[in-house]
Amino acid sequence: MEVDIKDSKKIDFSNLVDLINFDTFYGRGGSFLITPLHQSKVFSKEMFSEDQKMFANAALEYAETRLKPVKDEFKTLNKDLTLELFKEIGEMGFLGVDMPEEYGGSDLDKTTAALVVDYLAFSECGSLLVTLGAHSGIGTLPIVWYGTKEQKEKYLPKIASGEWMSSYALTEPNAGSDAMNGETTAYLNDEKTHYILNGQKIYITNGSWANVCITFAKVDGKMTGFILDKECEGWVIGAEEKKMGIKGSSTTTMFYENCKVPVENMLGTIGEGGHIAFNVLYAGRWKLGFSSAAGCMSSMNGAYKFALERKQFSRSITKFDMIKRKFANMVIKAWESDTLNYATTGSIDHSIEKLDKTDHDYYVKVQKIIEDHAIEASICKVLGSDALAYCVDESVQIFGGAGFIEEYSAAGVYRDERINRIFEGTNEINRLLVAGTFLKKAILEEIPIRDVIFKREENMIPDVNQSGHELEIEMSVIEYCRSLTLKTLDNLINIYGQDLKNKQWVLEPLADVVISLSVMHNGFCRYNQLESGGHKEKTLTVLKVSISEHYNKMIKNVKEINCHIMSKMNLEDDNKNNDFCMSNDSSILALNYCVNTIALKKEICDEFYKNGKYYLNV
Ligand SMILES: Cc1cc2nc3c(=O)[nH]c(=O)nc-3n(C[C@H](O)[C@H](O)[C@H](O)COP(=O)(O)OP(=O)(O)OC[C@H]3O[C@@H](n4cnc5c(N)ncnc54)[C@H](O)[C@@H]3O)c2cc1C
């Protein structure tokens, strides 16, 4: 914690918060929990550098001209086309964006690596994106971050160019969410030349196509990472799974039957496997947020094209208000997810930029920064996949019966979408991570959550110093929500202590409270940084609904928690109990915060119709 102490004699606990220099928390994970709006900043699409714009345009053009025309070819497994495109994408440099230059990559920032995913996702080739995601994320980063020089030299150039495809095998029949419970074992052979792996991994993406696999096995009971390649005897690939969606991607079981892995292919050290396995998942989570946001935009655009042509009751169904509401909701959810995604990579990049690339511990420090953003990574995943689920479901609804018929696009997208709430940690596990990391950051004082809680006890709505700002009331509402989030955690810690991490009935709504705060906070900051003009005005309408809806969501979730813990709070009488349960606070009532969301949604839908597509991309 960085504290500006001007005169140490004046310090007392209640003044501590006033002395915190919140600006210094930009680039730290969870900083949105404590930093007042007027001292916050955020990265967004509108701030792309020229290089980032160039990558975005190149990826979008490739997605629209090369990939989209063949999207129906991925309705079933199509190995030849997948491998052809995979190599092409490698030659274009998109597979190596996250890899060091000396091994054939371009070592770009996290935002550029993610925006490639974002814009390629406009191809609407869900299966291909899953193939690419497993390859260049979880199938590659373990070697970049933990590999020896020899391992990097051997594998990374071929992985970056698309000559070799990679995979990541962690899940086992008895170890899914509880991934550390795996039963696969490894022992060193008598000659000490090879580790011998025995066990089984299930549901592995790229299973039957991959030349390389990052996998995990227990050596003397300690989870350890290994790199498998086609030279490893005993690496046996099972049959293709028959899946609900993403049918154009390969998913298989892998059997390790006395599988011989050279000792030099151990990744990291014995016992480091859990760390490796989990750390690389963070990047996978925010990238899934990016592909989900793009999916939201594509599905609303597709539904609009259909709706425009479809006439019922002598008019296009776009004229019906219930259809308009759906489109407005889709725009809002897509914008929220997009906002959180770039806020997350921007914050990570801000911290990584300060590192020295020649530092021997460079990648250790990069990982620490990424791990520090565990809350943000999980929020990107949950918010994005939930938004996509909403958008594709409403898209099917707008198609009506045609939405249920394979000839139309909506049905396939509906099935493809479903996996996003399951892999890269189910949304339940990610909500546990959001709430659990919030608790951990407070208890370990990684950021001064306790100090801010203490200060806000006195005043739930600190002065936002922004009189005359067009969103002055909304700023107060968000600050109130920040206080409420912190106070709710404080109440829960006081009641349950560290055992809170096991109380899922309250952890799930607590995670949603944190998610709502992060949407309101980052949404406001994104808007506030925009240059005046049409784009800013259109963003304002969306932001106002977003804040109003997340405020209501937050109040509902806090009430649910408070009504559950009320009896344990030892409040004086029924009135106090009632006040506590309803989260009544006279200051927020005085703000008279009441938003005409129907009028705003009408405006949002009008703008969407005027553009004929999602209109808040730059
Ligand atoms: C198409 C596809 C591709 C995949 N690709 C890969 C891959 O490339 N590599 C890889 O290693 N794995 C992969 N997986 C596996 C995937 O990551 C797991 O399926 C996922 O982590 C869930 O594990 P599980 O299926 O065992 O479900 P379970 O862990 O059995 O979960 C079942 C349900 O219980 C809930 N649950 C479990 N634990 C808790 C808890 N503590 N608290 C609350 N709820 C809980 C879950 O949220 C879920 O709703 C893939 C799966 C699929 C379907």
Image (cartoon, rainbow, N blue to C red):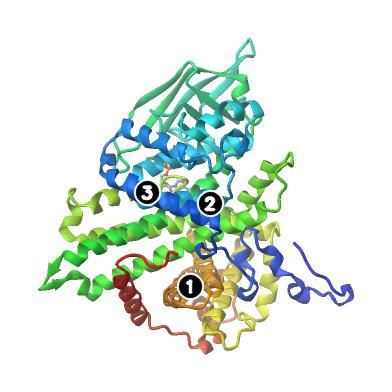
For mark 1, what is the residue?
Answer: 559
Q: Residue at x 37, y 37 (%)?
A: 85
Label 3 vs 2, first from the N-terminus: 3
For mark 3, what is the residue?
Answer: 63
Indicate if the residue with disc 3 has its beta carbon within 8 Å of ligand 1.
Answer: no
Q: Position of residue 96 (x, y in %)?
A: 52, 39
For mark 2, what is the residue?
Answer: 112
Give the amino acid type for the residue marked by disc 2 in the picture. Thr
Give the amino acid type for the residue marked by disc 3 in the picture. Ala
The image shows residue 472, relative to residue 419, as above or below, that is: below
The image quarter in which residue 31 lies: bottom right
Whether residue 88 is visible to the viewer of this picture, yes or no, is yes
- Position of the C terminus by quadrant: bottom left
Mark 3 crowd level (few <14, some 14–19, many ≥20, 10 Å Cα): many
Depth check: 303 or 519 in front? 303
The image shows residue 313, relative to residue 79, as above or below, that is: below
Indicate if the residue with disc 2 has its beta carbon within 8 Å of ligand 1.
Answer: no
